[in-house]
Amino acid sequence: MSLVERIADAVLYEGYILYPYRPSAVKNQQRWNFGVVCPESYAVSQIGNDSSTMRTECLLEANASTTLDVKVRFLHLLLRETANFSDGASVKEWHEAVAREVLVPRVEIGTLQSQRVKFDFPASRTIEPVTSDANAVMVLRTQQAIAGEIEISATRLDQQLKLSVVIRNLTLFADAINRSRDEALLYSFVSTHTILEAHQGSFVSLLDPPEPYKAAALQCINTGTYPVLVGDEGARCCVLSSPIILYDYPQIAPESAGDLFDGTEIDEILTLRIMSLTDDEKREMRSTDDFARRLLERTESMSPEQLLNLHGVMKKV
């Protein structure tokens, strides 16, 4: 599961902040485009791309002893407002995030009809004064309460089961038609994904199903997510249902020194670009949040050997 969760963490923080890793950059003005499960009132009022549900369906070879572990993970956003009183009480806003995880009690496939698990996370509000010789800063962090439901069911299709996992956002979001997407995101599940682990059972690839399973695979309907096999090559006990399109058995290159929040880019290019930022740009990046600060510190402390490893690797195929 450590390998699976490394892949899942990359999915969780995909697009969290993009190069040049500063809030003032245009590409960081609209974030959180993957895996958003918003309140139903907002989905209905906006008639947009965001949905209040996420559905995963996949095929499972199961017997009477098969059990299933289900884990749903997402980001719970919070609004950080920074008031700088030294320059006239200007206020800067930034969305930070807290990783949330919901574990479903182990499912007995042989007796499964339909099972629903509700969950919620409370609101919070903190005020942090930050004072220095040059600045008097107040940091206010506000997080809204959210609530949801996970429904698990199974349907028999010939020799296998069609397993269904539906995630619903049950959060109340009043006056949705008059509120912005940024406001709705604070009541949403973001970068939502599901990890399924079967015991004494095997999943079937939906990307390349064996001939006997192709007709059944076509009956699997996935909404806002794409289930793939994960783990060691050839293993079929675990599925990651991700809002980002992946192939079966995705891997993180061992040469990567850490997350750059952009799985479609090359580590070497982004690392060199970070090194080329001006002092003012690095200062803004460092003050963005802990993720951006740690990324900058890691990049600036890389050894020549680590940088050389990013340049290219010869592999036998």
Image (cartoon, helix red, strand yellow):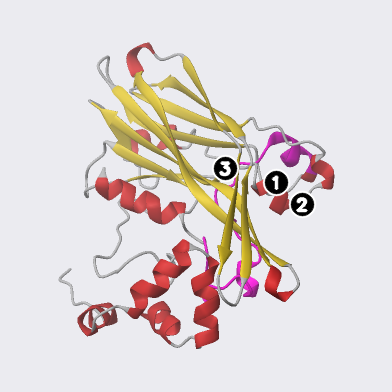
Judging from the image, what secondary structure is the residue with disc 2 in?
loop
Residue neighbourhood size for the residue with mark 2, other residues' Cα within 10 Å, grouped as few (<14), some (14–19), many (≥20): few
Inspect the image, locate mark 2, and give the three-letter code of the amino acid beneath it: Ser
Q: Is there a contact, CB below 8 Å, between mark 2 and mark 1?
A: yes
Spatial separation of the CA atoms under disc 3 and disc 2: 16 Å
**What x and y, as percent, mark residue 196?**
36, 35
Furthest residue toward front: 133
Query: Quadrant of the rendered structure where residue 121 is?
Result: top right
Which amino acid type is shown beneath numbered disc 3?
Answer: Phe
Which residue reaches farthest left? 316
Label 1: which residue? 184
Quadrant location of residue 246? bottom left
Question: Which numbered disc, 3 or 2, marks the residue that appears first in the sequence?
Answer: 2
Vertical side of 281 occupied by 123: above or below? above
Relative height, residue 7 to residue 262 (above, below): above
Query: Could you tell me which residue is drawn at 49 percent across and 48 percent down?
Result: 98
Name the secondary structure under disc 3: loop
Is residue 246 among the parts visible in the rendering? no
Which disc, if any, is residue 189? 3
Residue 37 drawn in magenta: yes
Q: Position of residue 215 (x, y in %)?
A: 43, 34
The residue carrying mark 2 is: 180
The spot of residue 234 in percent (x, y) is: 22, 46
Estimate the x, y position of residue 257 in percent, counting from the top left: 29, 69
Query: In which quadrant is the N terminus drawn?
Result: top left
How far is the residue under mark 1 from the one under mark 3? 10 Å
User: Start and end of the magenta stretch?
Assistant: 16-45
